[in-house]
Image (cartoon, rainbow, N blue to C red):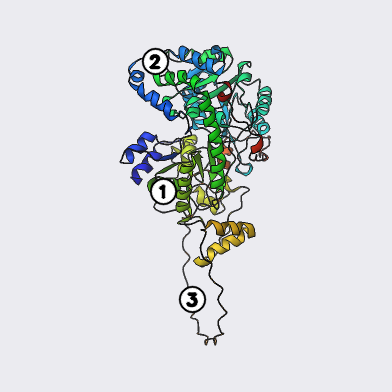
Amino acid sequence: MADNVTSLFRSTAAHSPSMAALAREGGDGTGPVDFCIPCNPYFPTPAMMDTMASRLKDIITYYPSSADTITAELCNLLQLPPQAVAMGNGSTELITWIDHLLVRESLAIPVPTFGRWTDQPMETGKRVDMFPLQESSGFALDLAQYAEFIRTRGTRVAVICNPNNPDGGFLHKHALVQFMDAMADLDLIVIDESFLEFADAEQEPSVVQEAMIRPNVIVLRSLGKNFGLHGIRFGYMVANPSLAGRVRSMLPKWNLNAFAEYVVFMLKEHGAEYAQSLHQVRRDRLDMASQLAALPGLTVYPSQGNFLFVRLPVGAEGTVVRDRMLTEHRILVRECGNKIGSSSRFLRLVVRPQVDVRRLVSGLEQVLYGTRRGAAVPELAQGTSYSSGTAAVDRLVGQTNGAGMQDLAAMAVGGGGMGGGVGMPMPVAQPMAVAAAAPMGAAASMGPAASMGTAASMGAGMPMPAQMPAPAPMPAPAPMPTPPPAPVAPAPFAPPSGPTPVGVPARGGLTAAQVRGMTAPAPGAPQELSQAPATGWPNAQSWPNAAGMGQTG
């Protein structure tokens, strides 16, 4: 099974294999516990599912109503004018038509992000200017620096995902409005709010109302992500009637299926359950982040989406962790090495109920630390033989014909001067220590408070060894002559085979710094972007109870 699963991930480029494909490879036809696909685990409710199941024959037998009819019902629910809305067979259908109709030559997008925003324009020959989000600032998007980047590059279309996928970074409404004002001369600004329903950092975070009165702004929304129904494929965009009409005129009359129609028409009776589901996801997000942050060496980034972006401990390879979690624990996680601007040290983990989170944490403990928490395991030789961190960049660097650039990791380790290690110190090699002393040494290096927490996390109730009396001194043995060491011929240099150090790309891959070199500012412009401040978790006492559709439905 492991080889088949690995081949599934290898063949999906910038995305993950479908749950149906994974279920087929599982042998018994059941899928794994899904921490990969970002959806709402609490909506629709079981009763709503039962109602849909009872109507299954009619739903799949007969034609749906026209897209105009379904759109009118959705607009009645959301209190939006139908002429300002276009519904698509998933938000990706709308992204495709936005690219074909409204993107003339170039598009700017912060990375890492949703893969279709980078891939779709490149597939149609557009220039994609990628603005790298900095790990050192928690992947927060600095809008002033992004605007300067757009001006320097001369980009005509700007895209912002709020919250961003995969890191969950959030921008307040007033900041986005200021950005739209400053970029009013661009051909188009797209604000992708696919995950905004899960945000609670602001009472009314959407810029939908602003989009309807501006000539160059589109807001994109995804119903599948909000409702936990990715398979139905329905999303919508909001813009001024002229922009929305151009996109709507290109869509087929029956581009929405009967399942989409049935769900849209039943939503008006379940607004309270939907609002409650959003509230529960937000509570689960806090608790899940707390449990993951307790794992030694694991970094959890602030998120306003229904997922968490985490960095694995040094020495843990994401593809190995992903494959072992799936094959050994039947848990599917999203390894982000095939996202431009990310690497295989990062995972995106979807927020799920606590019973599933406990299973996830237990599996990560076994994969990362063995049977208990401690130092991260090195990369495993029996893991995948490819680096998914190169896949996205291979698509970008066409002249390599998909092979990637070879030996970059070795060059960076050997001081080759590649951009991956700029500003990031290489880890100092440590001498081998006695195995029994390793946990104590690790705890001591973290300080008294951290060492107490580490000791507690290694298992309550473990008896500490009693202090033994000092043994009586023994007579020193007579010194033995030591033969001179035999000369050893120097071994030829070989690329390191151990863990990938911090700042070094996965073998054969590129770092975000090297991707940045392909979208560098013009000569004479500032070559380095200053770091944006990282945003912390919002104040829990000030969070609203519901957002988005829960307020209007």
Looking at the image, tell me whether mark 3 or mark 2 is earlier in sequence order.
2
Three-letter amino acid code at disc 2?
A: Pro
The residue mark sitting in front, 3 or 2, is: 2
The C terminus - image quarter: top right
Q: Which residue is mark 2?
A: 64
Mark 3 belongs to which amino acid?
Pro
Q: Quadrant of the N terminus?
A: top left
Q: Which residue is denoted by mark 1 in the rendering?
A: 324
Q: Residues within 10 Å of mark 2 (few under 14, many from 20)?
A: some
Residue under label 3, please give it. 485
Q: Position of residue 387 (x, y in %)?
A: 45, 45
**Gap between marks 3 and 2, in whole Å?**
84 Å
> Distance between the Cα atoms at labels 1 and 2?
43 Å
Mark 1: amino acid: Arg
Q: CA separation, marks 3 and 1? A: 43 Å
- Secondary structure under tag 3 reads loop
Query: Residue 309 in the image: x percent, y percent?
Result: 54, 41
- Is residue 518 or residue 312 the one in the foreground? 312
